[in-house]
Image (spheres, rainbow, N blue to C red):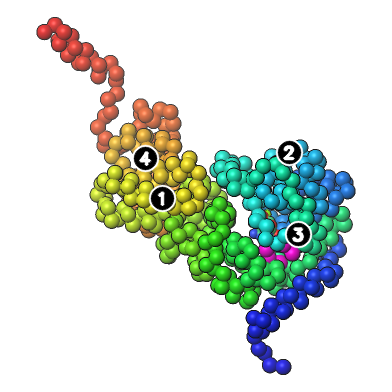
Amino acid sequence: MGHRLATPCEEAFFFVTNETLSDLEPQVLSRPEHSLSRTLISKNTLKVLYRLHRAGYLAYLVGGGVRDILLERRPKDFDVGTNARPTEIRRLFRNSRIIGRRFRLVHLLFKGETIEVSTFRASPDAEEAPESWDGDEGNEERLADIEELETDGHGEPLPEEYGTPEEDARRRDLTINGLFYNISDFSIIDHVGGLEDLDARLIRTIGEPVQRLQEDPVRMMRALEYAVRLGFEVEAATDRAIHECAGMIAEASPARLTYELLEALTSGQAAGICAAWQHYGIFERAFPEAIQGGDELIRVLEEVDRRHAAGQQLSEASLFGAIFLPRLAAVLREQAPAEARVDNSKLLRSQRELLGPACAEMHVANRKQHLINGGIFAVSKLRRPPERGRQVVKLVRQESFPVTWDLFTIGVGTGLLPWDTLAPWSQAVEQVHRLGADARQRFQLEGEDQPRRSHARRRRPRRRRGRHASTS
Ligand code: ATP
Ligand code: MG
């Protein structure tokens, strides 16, 4: 029989058949048949799994934790699936809170770790809430944003929304994300062909790809994100479906899109992920105001990734700011070529026009927007060499200065901003940091006129003038 591509109709038939095959037994690997060792699961996660198990519930490690350990990668976080209901989970764990509107997820908060526990559910089109929050201020804000979107009173979810473990596996996004590790016998349970795709290094949606991407277009971003993060190939039908559905990304909830963007920016592979999103026409459609494609943005993201690799954690404000860097540099070039001074109010106006709609589109919280604004604005000051010690101290003491410095150095590192002021500014900033609280009194630039040092000497002539005036 010759090789021939299946017609769409045949493909649909194949998937329908596949669905009906779902009644077949899953592939189960017993402990000796796989490499997932408990020593690779965090202590807190094990505690959660065991407590659920001892209370008589099914307790599975699910999602990225299973995938990454099988790939000999360190999981970013651990997710747990169970047949315990959210209220039952809460009864077992005091350190917990329920999030999500339709399907309640429970976040168990441990020191330095949040574990997401979700009750098995059936519906494939459920919107996912983001899974974990490190608890830093920025993340709390993100959580608040999303809770606002997804929390709806205190009513219990409808019972029919819960499902069997198999249904739960099938409602997940990608086959490699649909694997379960069962704490009761340490086996791996595969209802969706995830083990095979892990071996073949393939990204494939669970079920019919167009339908699954239509249900939740954010899955397109996730599919490409994992393809880049893991170095996997996108399977042919999934690839076609992403091309076909790319336009639908605009319909997804902005808070979730921004969440995925931040996941990418902090992954250490931001450049690759965003380039893949660009390639499929998803990036600009997801963020029409904030993202203008092009190589410059990818270069900036490569620099962001280099910092990540060097162990530097950029704040969310710096990461958002970095996205605007190419456009900011263009504005600066246009408004103040070379070292010329910028017209502050004109620059602020352009910045507001650029950032306002983009931040609104990305649901950036006000406080963070304030930091991004201040941080970006001061970058213009660093294009000229430092002039006065007091100017440097004042700038460095600004709350948004860390953002400014990140953006300036990233801009210089990528050739978007001129490099010749980097050395004098680095020196000056370092000195100010070194002087700490004394900087205001003691810091001055080389060759700068002696600052007015002694109060006594400064005041005397003034007093004399005063006396003079009063006697005349
Ligand atoms: P990582 O945490 O390393 O990014 P992960 O696979 O654990 O990877 P999460 O975002 O933590 O990703 O989601 C946990 C699991 O929830 C996923 O593995 C997947 O099974 C499921 N999931 C997440 N988002 C979706 C979605 N949009 N549609 C269907 N299932 C999803
Ligand atoms: Mg996870």
Q: Amino acid at mark 1?
A: Leu
Q: Earlier in the sequence, mark 4 or mark 2?
A: 2
Would you place residue 305 above or below residue 364 in this image? below
Which of 231 and 60 lies nearest the eye of the viewer?
A: 60
Mark toward the viewer: 3 or 4: 3
Q: Position of residue 214 (x, y in %)?
A: 61, 66
Q: Earlier in the sequence, mark 3 or mark 4?
A: 3
Q: Which residue is mark 4?
A: 428
Q: Position of residue 426 (x, y in %)?
A: 39, 44
Q: Which of the labelled discs sits on residue 122, or is there none?
A: 3
Q: Quadrant of ligand 2?
A: bottom right
| Residue placed furthest toward the left | 472
- Tell me how many marks there are: 4
Q: Earlier in the sequence, mark 1 or mark 4?
A: 1
Q: Which residues are magenta?
A: 168-175
| Residue placed furthest toward the bottom | 1
Mark toward the viewer: 4 or 2: 2
Q: Secondary structure at mark 2?
A: loop
Q: Which of the labelled discs sits on residue 355, or is there none?
A: 1
Residue pictured at 80% horizontal, 40% vertical: 91
Residue pictured at 52% horizontal, 61% vertical: 250
